[in-house]
Image: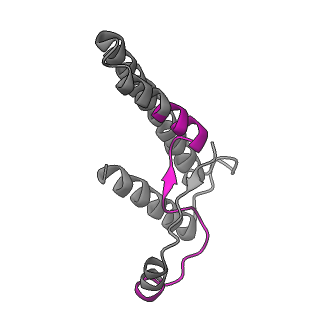
């Protein structure tokens, strides 16, 4: 799965981040969406439709909102599972000789990726 990078075009943000953060290698995007844009937009539209349909059919509106939440949770769970497997494979030597261990740089990159994903989840 390809993850989409969030961008901030604010000049204040880019100046601040340039001063306060050393340049980072392009290892992995820091802010990524777990659900692709088109699917997020479709889920948001379904949710909006359930909200606007409440007056005409409250029970159906609530059932649809519940279905949207279920689908969203399912997609996020699948994306996180895939990302966890991918991260684990990178540092446990997927595709390498089973006796080979990850070098310190690979482990540093893996630790950073785990930290970034976990911190992002904790901000939810």
**Which colour assignment does the render follow?**
one colour
Along the line of sight, the residue nearer the viewer: 57 or 37: 57
From the top left corner, tell me how far across and down residue 41 is, in percent.
53, 38
- Side of 13 where 37 appears, left or right: right
Answer above or below: position of 121 versus 35.
below
- The relative height of residue 27 versus residue 19 in the rendered view (above or below) is above
Instruction: Give the camera-side residue of 21 and 111.
Output: 21
The residue at the point 41 percent across, 19 percent down is 67
Name the foreground residue: 79 vs 106: 79
**In the figure, is residue 2 to the left or right of 42?**
right
**Percent x, y of residue 114:** 43, 56
Residue 116 among magenta residues:
no
Q: Residue at x 44, y 25 (%)?
A: 49
Looking at the image, the residue that sits furthest to the bottom is: 19
Give the magenta-colored segment's residue range.
18-44
**Tally of numbered discs:** 0
Q: Is residue 28 magenta?
A: yes
Q: Residue at x 54, y 82 (%)?
A: 23
Tell me residue 121's x, y (percent): 35, 49
The furthest residue to the front: 56
Quadrant, the N terminus: top right
Is residue 77 depicted above or below 36 in this figure? above
Residue 97 horizontal/vertical position (percent)? 69, 50
- Residue positioned 57% across, 62% down in the render: 28
């Amino acid at each position: 799965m390809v993850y989409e990078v969030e961008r901030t075009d604010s000049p204040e943000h880019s100046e601040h981040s340039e001063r306060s953060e050393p340049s980072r290698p392009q290892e992995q995007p820091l802010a990524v969406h777990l659900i692709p844009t088109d699917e997020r937009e479709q889920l948001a539209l379904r949710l909006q439709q359930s909200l606007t349909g409440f007056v005409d059919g409250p029970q159906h509106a609530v059932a649809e909102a519940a279905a949207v939440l279920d689908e969203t949770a399912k997609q996020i769970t699948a994306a996180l599972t895939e990302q966890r497997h991918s991260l684990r494979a990178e540092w446990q030597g997927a595709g390498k000789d089973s006796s080979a261990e990850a070098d310190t740089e690979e482990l540093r990159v893996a630790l950073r990726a785990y930290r970034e994903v976990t911190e992002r989840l904790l901000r939810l």
